[in-house]
Image (cartoon, rainbow, N blue to C red):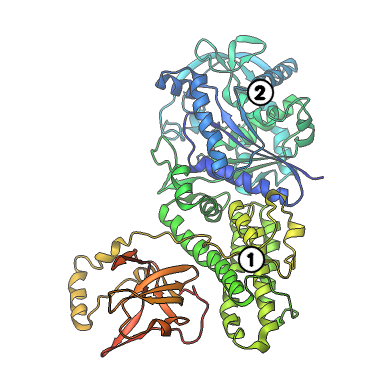
Amino acid sequence: MNRFYITTPIYYVNAEPHIGHAYTTIVADVINRFQKMMGSKTFFLTGTDEHGDKIAQAARAEGIPPKAYADRISGLFQNIWPKLGIDYDKFIRTTDPEHIQAVQYVLQKVFDAGEIYFSTYKGLYCVGCERFYMERELVDGKCPDHDTAPVEREESNYFFRMSKYQDWLIDHLEKNPECIRPERYRNEVLSFLKEPLEDLCISRPAERLDWGIPLPFDSKYVTYVWFDALINYISAIGYPEGELYGQFWPVAQHVIAKDILKPHGIYWPAMLKAAGVPMYRNLNVHGYWKTGEAKMSKSHGTVVRPLDLAPVYGLDAFRYFLMREMVFGLDASFSKEALVARINADLANDLGNLFSRTLAMTDRYFEGKTPPLALPPDEAMDGELLGKVDNAIRQFREQIPALGFHRALSAIWELIAAANRYIDYVAPWSLAKNPDSLPRLQTVMRTLLEVNRIVAVLIYPFMPETSSKMLERLGVEKRGTELRLDQDASWGALVEGTPVFKGESLFPRVETEGKKQEKPAQGANKAAVAQRVEQTGSPLIDIDLFRQVDLRIGQIEQAEKVPKSEKLVKLLVDIGEKRQIVAGIAKTHSPADLVGKQVVIVANLKPAKLMGIESHGMVLAVRDGNDLKLIVPEAETAPGGRIS
Ligand code: MSP
């Protein structure tokens, strides 16, 4: 059986989790879920990095002991991951006794092998990074990460002979071009390695900093935090003798951002080599989430907290956004507007609409039961759709292991778009009118149900909750982590006669404050607009403003007059979901005439109360003298269809 070990960085406990941490951890979760679907035996590790200057300082600032402080922040990380749908196997803390033991074991082993020596060092030290800097690494004399001037410091310390491993590492990276990916980061490491590598200072005098793991061969010193932290990847699985270590090392996949490329791309391989532990399999490096131009970070005050977003916009919508928006390896910028735009376009409109239309039509035409596949798929009409299914499955299989998450998702969304076009083109509501077309209607709806099922399977690693919800409503046994790509993404798994459940819409649209609405013009433009309003009665508006209006086809299912009102009628309208709408059309239209009619609805009006009855939308009509005529589609159309 294929084994797969995936890790995130262990996060420092000096800051609360933000979306940078969430992204890395969600990436690891997506990969882990994908590998399970491929039938691999997996192990997923995350945790917290709790020793060192930075943490000791943060604890001091709160006036509590470092362990108590670390307990608190580590707890925040442990609590947040399940809320983001992250299903890890182990959470390691560098204060765990097993970890401390493993670090001391490695140190002793490397020391005994003569790879650690004692010496005096004088140099420029950045407290934020907890490391000495070379002059040439500084930018304008300052630490490039913290933008602060390093302090001069002289110390006697223990050093690891890292320089000795330079040639071996260059050779390894050349022979294994995929080892550090994407390629730009491999090149970055190789370019570090063009300069002579220095030995690594791996201790701190305990009199200055006692919040660390004591060196086993000199208790006057504690271990440098990076030498301590990196070992978590093996201590967590029971190095040197644990069973998990035997199963999951060296098939390790580390996921990190580019800020910690050097420790992972250079120190860690050298440490492994010196300790006689085989090299990890892959280092997967992504870019930064930024707000505006700056890296999101506590020190910049630009932190976006995942729990401010996920519960508001939906956990799966949040995961989808992060995975769809960032090209792995490059930077991406975060904004709420971009998040909302993706939710409304990709989730509410494309996926949500496909699912609700499919289920609503199954309900209407087949009493909510899966119809038989009565005909072989009609090449002309179903062929394109089936091609998109194959393509989505292929891209999913190839792109996720190659870190092309956005590509996998866009292939799935091409399939969703093709299925929505297929509905518009085949027009099942027309087929439904002609009893001779029944076999074709059955085949079309069965095809659509299958497409929805396959979409539900393919989105599982990204949106596990939505995937289960969809499968459940399609009448497919809920299997969650038991899903397997080979069995579950193959065509035709649905069973004739299985009931489906319409339910609520998967992703309600997020209403944005239409702030521009009241102010169509400013300054010099005002005069031109005033002139136009005078001539035509309406100002010119921006297309984006028009796009904010959600116009849809609605099918009136029930209608009744509002008591004591001449004008008002209360309607129940299917617009892909059921809406109660109060309309002022009673003088011209009787309730009996209205039932069954298709109309155009403004679906995103703020709810209003008319004669004490709530109205969630507006029916469009045109006044013609004394008459009022409803705006209707040219031919019968699926309820919920967006008007563009
Ligand atoms: N404790 C070390 C890692 C030790 S691993 C043996 C550390 N911790 S950290 O809390 O600073 O986390 C850094 C990691 O958090 C990044 O590598 C990345 O995974 C994630 N991110 C933090 N900020 C980020 C962004 N703004 N954008 C993307 N990811 C970011 O370094």
The amino acid type of the residue labelled 1 equals Val
Position of residue 403 measured from the top left corner of the image (x, y, whole percent)? 64, 51
Along the line of sight, which residue is nearer the eye, 61 or 160? Answer: 61
The residue lying at 30 percent from left, 65 percent from top is: 612
- Residue 17 visible in this rendered orientation of the protein: yes
- Vertical placement of residue 355 versus 135, above or below: below
| Residue closest to the far right | 1
Position of residue 346 measured from the top left corner of the image (x, y, whole percent)? 52, 63
Residue topped by disc 2:
99
- Residue 131 visible in this rendered orientation of the protein: no
- Vertical placement of residue 66 versus 589, above or below: above
Q: Is residue 594 left or right of residue 330?
A: left
- Vertical placement of residue 550 versus 10, above or below: below
Q: Quadrant of the N terminus?
A: top right
Along the line of sight, which residue is nearer the eye, 393 or 84? Answer: 84
Disc 1 is placed on an element classified as loop
Q: Is residue 391 left or right of residue 120?
A: right
Q: Given this view, does label 2 or label 1 mark the residue nearer the observer?
A: 1
Q: Is mark 1 within 8 Å of ligand 1?
A: no
The residue lying at 79 percent from left, 35 percent from top is: 247
For residue 492, the mark is none
- Vertical placement of residue 81 versus 59, above or below: below
Label 2: few (<14), some or many (≥20) within 10 Å? many
Q: Quadrant of the C terminus?
A: bottom left
The image quadrant that residue 121 belongs to is top right
Indicate which disc, 2 or 1, sits on the residue closer to the N terminus.
2
The amino acid type of the residue labelled 2 equals His
